[in-house]
Amino acid sequence: MNNEYNSDDSNLNNSDFNPTMPPGKAAIYGLLIVFFLFQFGGGLLYLIIFGADLSSANVNALRLFNVAGQILFILAPAIILAKLVYVENISSILRIKTPNLKEIGIFILGLVILLPLLQSFIYVQNYIFQQLAESYSLFESIKNFADDLDKLMESTYVIILNADSIIEMIFVVLIVSVTPSICEEVFFRGFTQKSLEYSLKPFWAILITSFAFALYHFNPYGLIALTMLAAYLGFSAYLSNSILIPVILHFLNNFISVLSYFIWESDELMNTSIVKPEEFSTHLFSLVLLSALFFLFLFYIKKNYNKFQ
């Protein structure tokens, strides 16, 4: 294999690995292309079909449009780019591999630790940001902009999530949990991260991909939390070399959010409410404790992953 690429993938560690362009460059081009297609192309088409007033739009048509957008503007480009750049090595680049149940189970355990950690982080982050906004006009302006964007995203999310029957709830789960988990993981943890792994150290490949993933979601208060979540998905993809594991984790995360909305009408992971001063220390302690537990978990699984294979 060309020494320009850093990889320990035995399937590609041979003379057949001859990409049509440097993998790192392919990853950056992919991010730009999909961002333009999904955010601008999809957004323009969205306005043409539904207009600016979502309250009068047909909800099911809106849902189907989101599914089509994920498939056409994220999944399809990932597969096409993989074929154009890697030709015969698509399955290796997209990490098409079936993990065993032990591998899936151990990563689900990590997600169980990570989700409450992220909620505690958001509470602490928002409290600190609120204090800064009360003291400095610059932070107040940033907070006002973030609040407006957060309300816009939440209003769109609520329209899609509202369901009046079991069948409609299943339809919502398909749209919000199943479709994004497949489309986004194939593109981000498959094509993009895997391409970057051939040009950068795994840490940087995961970090860059995760930050891009968070930016794609336009969630101002969830930017860091989404980056952390995506980094865990990237870690699972790198360690297992299977796209199925991050797909399952992504599905579970979204499914829990949908389920919490159906039960409490609140997306607990993205709860952006400001905690009271007397509650801050509790959430800070929770954040420190869960962070220590989570990093111990990462250290353990990294050292002992062969036991789960």
Image (cartoon, rainbow, N blue to C red):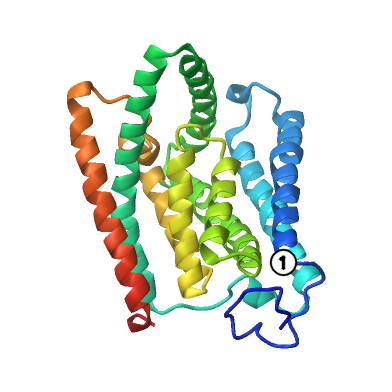
Nearest the camera: 30 or 100?
30
Q: Left or right of 159: which side holds 133?
A: left
Tally of marks: 1
On the image, which quarter does residue 276 sit in?
A: top left
Residue at the location (49% across, 39% down)?
Answer: 223
Residues packed near mark 1 inside 10 Å, few (<14), some (14 to 19) or many (20 plus): many
Query: Percent x, y for residue 11?
Result: 63, 85
Residue at the location (32% across, 67% down)?
Answer: 299
Q: What residue is pinned by disc 1? A: 23
Q: Is residue 105 visible?
A: no
Nearest the camera: 214 or 40?
214
Q: Left or right of 168: which side holds 54?
A: right
Query: Percent x, y for residue 20?
Result: 82, 71
Nearest the camera: 38 or 110?
110
Query: Percent x, y for residue 282?
Result: 18, 35
Query: Percent x, y for residue 175?
Result: 54, 48
Specify the quadrant that holds the N terminus: bottom right
The amino acid beneath tag 1 is: Pro
* Picture layout, residue 201 above or below residue 149: below
* Picture layout, residue 214 above or below residue 137: below
Q: Is residue 258 visible?
A: yes
Specify the quadrant that holds the C terminus: bottom left
What element does badge 1 sit on?
Answer: helix
Residue at the location (59% across, 80% down)?
Answer: 9
Residue at the location (59% across, 47% down)?
Answer: 212
